[in-house]
């Protein structure tokens, strides 16, 4: 959101994609080069010591979020994982088919960039995930990751068949204890059955 980027003092909203690409390249330079140098529009450095280097080789994993085509391409070209939100109303990835198609695009972009597509992790933020009453999704069907614990386990399984490796849930309660209770309930009722 433009308001979030402005609040954080980021680049102009219209430049967010170019800035993201450059920031990723700059971090890779910092993490992997003994004497890093980068001269760009959004980041510039030279003559500095950046240490310690990450123990993960060749660098720390970079997960790229976003559902739009540009984010999928960025994830394929520069990322180690793709991390979209399932319930974006403009680009919903709320079915195994839509998610799998998006991940396939990411991996195809990785291949075009000469990268191993199998090295791109598939993740999703199921922000609406709730055990309990089913939420209505598009076309009047149950929204994925809502309903009974077994329905959510089944959803995760169907998404895994399409490449999902990491499922992150929205665990926001009314207060700290409510959030902890939601997460504990999810752990015991869903995670325990997904192993």
Image (cartoon, rainbow, N blue to C red):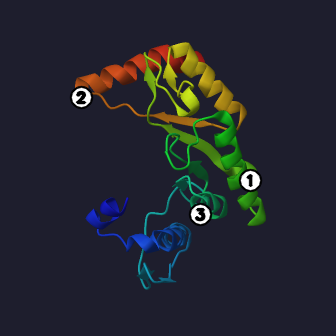
Looking at the image, residue 90 lies above or below residue 97 = below
Residue nearest the observer in this picture, 17 or 93: 93
Residue 68 rendering spot, x and y as whole percentages? 57, 57
Q: Quadrant of residue 10?
A: bottom left
SS label for mark 3: helix
Residue 98 rendering spot, x and y as whole percentages? 66, 41
Q: Residues within 10 Å of mark 1 (few under 14, many from 20)?
A: many
Q: Is residue 195 visible?
A: no
**In the displayed structure image, the side of residue 88 where residue 195 appears, left or right:** right
Dot 1 or dot 2, earlier in sequence: 1
Q: How many marks?
A: 3
- Alpha carbon separation for disc pair 1 and 2: 39 Å
Q: Which mark is residue 117?
A: 1
The residue at which mark 3 appears reads as: 70
Looking at the image, residue 48 lies above or below residue 24 = below
Q: Which mark is residue 192?
A: none
Q: Residues within 10 Å of mark 3 (few under 14, many from 20)?
A: few
Q: Residues within 10 Å of mark 2 (few under 14, many from 20)?
A: few
SS label for mark 2: helix
The residue at which mark 2 appears reads as: 176
């Amino acid at each position: 959101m433009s308001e979030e980027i402005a609040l954080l003092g980021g680049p102009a909203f219209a430049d967010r994609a170019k800035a993201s690409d450059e920031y990723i390249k700059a971090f890779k330079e910092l993490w992997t080069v003994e004497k890093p140098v980068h001269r760009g529009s959004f980041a510039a450095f030279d003559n500095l010591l950046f240490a310690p280097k990450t123990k993960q080789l060749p660098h720390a994993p970079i997960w790229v979020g976003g559902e739009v085509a540009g984010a999928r391409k960025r994830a394929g070209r520069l990322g180690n994982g793709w991390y979209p939100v399932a319930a974006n109303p403009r680009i919903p990835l709320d079915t195994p088919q839509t998610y799998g198609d998006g991940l396939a695009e990411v991996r195809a972009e990785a291949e075009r960039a000469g990268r191993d597509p199998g090295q791109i992790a598939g993740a999703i933020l199921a922000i609406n995930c709730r055990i309990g009453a089913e939420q209505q999704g598009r076309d009047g069907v149950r929204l994925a990751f809502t309903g009974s614990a077994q329905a959510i386990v089944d959803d995760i399984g169907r998404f895994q068949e399409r490449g999902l490796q990491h499922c992150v849930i929205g665990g926001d309660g009314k207060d700290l204890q409510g959030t902890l209770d939601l997460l504990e309930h999810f752990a015991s009722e869903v995670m325990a059955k997904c192993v």
